[in-house]
Amino acid sequence: MKKALLIYANGSEDIEITATADVLARGGIAVVHAALGDNCEVKLAHGTRVHCDLCLKDADDRYDVIVIPGGLQGALDCSKDETLLKLLHAQKESGRLIAAICAAPGFVLARNGILENERATGYPGCDDEIKNCTGKGVEISENGQFITGKGPAFSMQFALAVLKQLEGPVITEKVAEGMLF
């Protein structure tokens, strides 16, 4: 079974992380919810409280995808978290999938040299550091290693793109149809 590490920080965008967690679980992916810092409970940008499975410092480095949501404060905190940055650099070096949406592609990936010259998208005003920003709702890099999303309105398309990259079109279409998407 494939595993996804979903990153939760205080101030992460509620719908972006929740939609992705739901879609991946429906597609048969083992979803691990990991909180930045020493407290496994986080408060998302619009008040949703989440008790995560573990604190990020206790996560291993064996995930098929690492997913980072936006939300300004959450993305800024993620951009400075040494544990997360170490995991992301290892994920990139191993050729495994990295997915980020909204403020995260610019503030977390581009700012820390993880996205480098890949095609990507991000939230307007948070995407200035993305060298090859396309402005699309969802963008998959040429090598397929990076999936980025523009913002909350694209949460479902983003989540389905991540699932498709992991499990292919048949399972993704079944999940989308079951959700009436």
Image (cartoon, grey):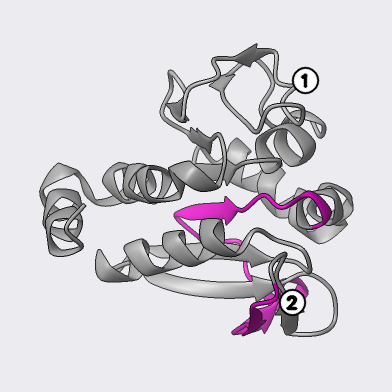
Q: Which residue has dot 2 on it?
A: 43
Query: Which mark, by number, is residue 178?
Result: none
Graded by Cα atoms within 10 Å as few (under 14), some (14 to 19) or many (20 or more), the crowding at tag 1 reads: some
Q: Residue at x 20, y 45 (%)?
A: 168
Q: Is residue 56 left or right of residue 79?
A: left
Query: Which mark, by number, is residue 128?
Result: 1
Res 127 → quadrant: top right
Task: For the N terminus, give its image quadrant.
Answer: bottom left
Give amino acid for label 2. Answer: Lys
* Proximity of marks 1 and 2: CB atoms separated by less than 8 Å: no
x, y percent for residue 65: 48, 53
| Magenta stretch contains residue 17 | no
x, y percent for residue 131: 70, 13
Give amino acid for label 1. Answer: Asp
Relative height, residue 43 to residue 20 (above, below): below
- 165 vs 59, nearest the viewer: 165
Q: Is residue 78 left or right of residue 69?
A: right
The kind of secondary structure element at disc 1 is loop
| Magenta stretch contains residue 60 | yes
The kind of secondary structure element at disc 2 is strand
Relative height, residue 65 to residue 129 (above, below): below
Q: Residue at x 45, y 42 (%)?
A: 154
User: So how many labels did they put on this image?
Assistant: 2
Q: Is residue 25 left or right of residue 143?
A: left
| Residue 62 can be seen, yes or no | no
Q: Residue at x 55, y 41 (%)?
A: 94
x, y percent for residue 121: 57, 26
- Per the rendered image, the range of residues in magenta is 47-73
Question: Closer to the N terminus: mark 1 or mark 2?
Answer: 2
